[in-house]
Amino acid sequence: MTTETPLLAVKDLEVGYGAIQALRGISLEVRQGEIVTLIGANGAGKTTTLRAISGMLRPRSGQVSYDGRSVIGVRPHLMVGRRLIHVPEGRGIFLNLTVEENLRLGAYTRTDDYTDDLNRVYELFPRVKERLKQTAGTMSGGEQQMLAIGRALLARPRLLLLDEPSLGLAPKIVQTIFSVIREINQSGTTILLIEQNARMALQSAHRAYVLEAGKIIMDGDARELVASDEVRKAYLGAH
């Protein structure tokens, strides 16, 4: 599962919004074939981290290397061409377009036949296939999340960034989404996951980082962090 050179390497990353320092020199890595999760409270800097990795934010300092090359300053649409795909918090689908139109936008950089990938999305998310002609804005929150992930898969991600995929969803739908996330990973896609449901994230991930006030305060094997008293008290509701 591992390689000598990480697929993604973040080193001493600092990001700010005006006078606010959002990330304070964080470092992390994601190796080929892993699910790595980043957990922390609201405002810890999780979403900022993903936005800096995918080129949506320009860091003040530090390095982001993807597939052995620096991607600092690379525009987000070019990152898509390099198969680093970001599913943002809030899903980012086009509500006024049909489900089918949203899916096809996921393949806009491709010049090959993507029928097999489209059929794979339908296998993972049967509800998406059932609603192809439906306007995306009329779907439930869970269905919209399925569409957002399905659209991302049509770009053939080598590294998939997922920001809060379970946000606002019913527990049964959350189980479905995480089952698919694990299946996507087992099919060869590397995943960096941000998730408010820390228990679900740690149960699904290989490794994890804990982010607090813009700093990494803990990292390690996900199963070991689940057993950590500090993590359990802070994020898993244990007393």
Image (cartoon, rainbow, N blue to C red):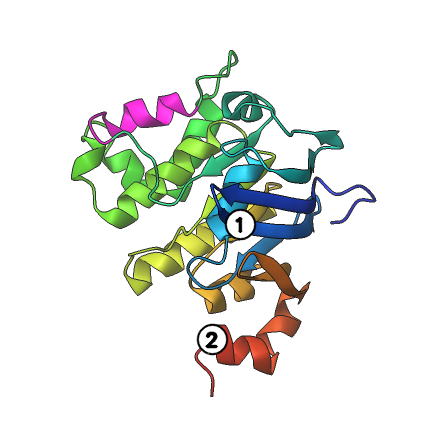
Q: Residues within 10 Å of mark 2 (few under 14, many from 20)?
A: some
Residue 10 image offset from top left, x and y in percent = 68, 44
Amino acid bearing label 2: Leu
Residue 83 picture quarter: top right
Closer mark to the observer between disc 2 and disc 1: 1
Q: Name which residue type carries label 1.
A: Gln
Residue sitting at x 47%, y 41%: 18
Query: In the image, residue 190 lies at what x, y percent?
Result: 61, 43
Name the foreground residue: 110 vs 62: 62
Query: How many residues crowd mark 1 within 10 Å: few (<14), some (14–19), many (20+)?
Result: some
- Could you tell whether 157 is left or right of 9 in the image? left
| Picture layout, residue 180 above or below residue 131 | below
Q: Quadrant of residue 221?
A: bottom right
Distance (Cα) linking label 2 and label 1? 27 Å
SS class of the residue under badge 1?
strand
Front residue of 180 and 75: 75
Between 58 and 68, the one lying in front of the other is: 58
Find disc 1 in the rendering and name its residue: 21
The residue segment tinted magenta is: 95-106
Residue to which mark 2 is pinned: 236
Residue at left 29%, top 25%? 100
Magenta span includes 99? yes
How far across and down, in percent of the image, does residue 212 sit?
A: 54, 63
